[in-house]
Amino acid sequence: MNLAKRQCTPCRADTPRLSGDQLALLLPELGPDWDAGDGRLRKTFRFPDFASALAFVNRVGEVAEREQHHPDILLAWGRVAIELWTHAIGGLSENDFILAAKIDGLNNGA
């Protein structure tokens, strides 16, 4: 399954959260260092300077707008922390993994 080629679909409050076996199947589909604890998907990306980190944040923002699925983003000198979860369900959905895969692709192209 190539998550990066898929599109996010709107979630509703009754969309089931992913857990257990579902998470175990999807997490290896992402690049290294993603953590799926606490019902959130998190990763910190490292950069050589602030400008590179900011450029990455802007690329993430463009993808998030296209997908209509928006992460929490922390920008600091040389690093960007991404946190994803589906607010409508208060946990992880397939959309979070799709966006995470797309974000990994952006970093590979940096």
Image (spheres, rainbow, N blue to C red):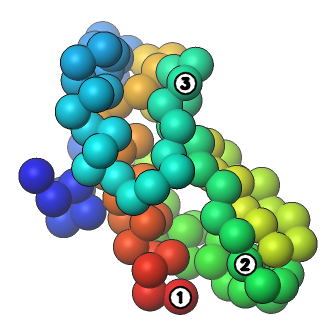
Left or right of 109 on screen, residue 17? left
In the displayed structure, 84 sits above or below 91; it is below
The residue under label 1 is 110
| Circles 3 and 2: CB atoms closer than 8 Å | no
Q: Residues within 10 Å of mark 2 (few under 14, many from 20)?
A: some
Q: Nearer the viewer, residue 56 or 30?
A: 30
Q: Residues within 10 Å of mark 3 (few under 14, many from 20)?
A: few
Question: Where on the picture, by quarter, is residue 26?
Answer: top left
Outermost residue to the left: 1
| Circles 2 and 1: CB atoms closer than 8 Å | yes
The residue under label 2 is 47
Q: CA distance from mark 1 to mark 3?
A: 27 Å
Answer with mark 2 or mark 1, whichever residue precedes in sequence.
Answer: 2
| Circles 1 and 3: CB atoms closer than 8 Å | no
Q: Which mark is residue 29?
A: none
Residue 72: percent from left, percent from top = 66, 46
In the displayed structure, 96 sits above or below 24; it is below
At 51% across and 76% down in the image, what residue appears? 107
Q: Nearer the viewer, residue 93 or 35?
A: 35
Residue 51: percent from left, percent from top = 80, 88
